[in-house]
Image (cartoon, rainbow, N blue to C red):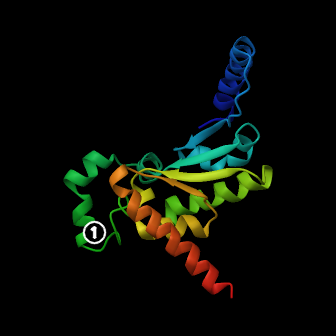
Amino acid sequence: GHVNELKRQRDQLEPVAKQVMAERHMQIDYKFGTMIEVPRAALTADEIAEYAQFFSFGTNDLTQMTFGISRDDAEGKFLLKYVEQKLLPDNPFQVLDRGGVGKLMKMAVESGRNKRPELEIGICGEHGGEPSSIQFCHQIGLKYVSASPYRVPVARLAAAQAALGEATRDR
């Protein structure tokens, strides 16, 4: 959640990577990045972008921390009742919560790219295989999804539909 954690990791990793490549007489291009899984990281994405070439939103953890609930505890106890009683429109662990988690993500994308315009940003987790969540991620500028193998076909179709929808609107 704090930029200094990432900075320390990068400061420790880069000399070792250079040393190993020199010893092996090889050059490997790699990118250094981080997961954005806690609200503080999303809120300070501009600072983090100074040291990261990519972000990957871990939306399962980000959802838990934004709502302040454990997925395992909530789904087994009260969350389904909240959805049934319309206290929540959807299970936020299945469909991305645009009003809270999505707002944090959008802020992080904007501030991260203001600091580093070429910043690569994507999503991983269950939301990466849910069509309406993928549509939202496309709208805020995410470029890739990582999902469980069984969700990949749905994710690919949803990403294609989001891109085609944008192309159709732009005409």
Name the residue rendered at 74%, 16% in the picture.
Answer: 25
Q: Quadrant of the C terminus?
A: bottom right
Answer few, some or many: residues within 10 Å of disc 1's Cα (few below 14, many 20 plus, some between 14 and 19): some
Name the residue rendered at 56%, 41% in the picture.
Answer: 35
Q: In terms of depth relative to the viewer, which is nearer, 94 or 134?
A: 134
50 to 156, vertically: above or below: above
Name the residue rendered at 75%, 15% in the picture.
Answer: 22
Farthest residue, direction bottom: 171
In this picture, residue 84 sits left or right of residue 59: left
Please tell me whether mark 1 sits on a helix, a strand or a loop.
Answer: helix
Farthest residue, direction top: 23
Q: Is residue 96 visible?
A: no
Q: In terms of depth relative to the viewer, which is nearer, 162 or 153?
A: 153
Total marks placed: 1
103 to 148, vertically: above or below: below
The quadrant in which residue 92 appears is bottom left
The quadrant in which residue 53 appears is top right
Residue 145 image position (x, y, % from top left): 51, 55
Q: In terms of depth relative to the viewer, which is nearer, 7 or 126?
A: 126
Name the residue rendered at 66%, 57% in the picture.
Answer: 109
Residue, disc 1: 83
Residue 70 image position (x, y, % from top left): 33, 46
Q: Is residue 150 visible?
A: yes
In this picture, residue 24 sits left or right of residue 77: right
Farthest residue, direction front: 25
- Three-letter amino acid code at disc 1? Val
77 to 171, vertically: above or below: above
Q: Quadrant of the N terminus?
A: top right
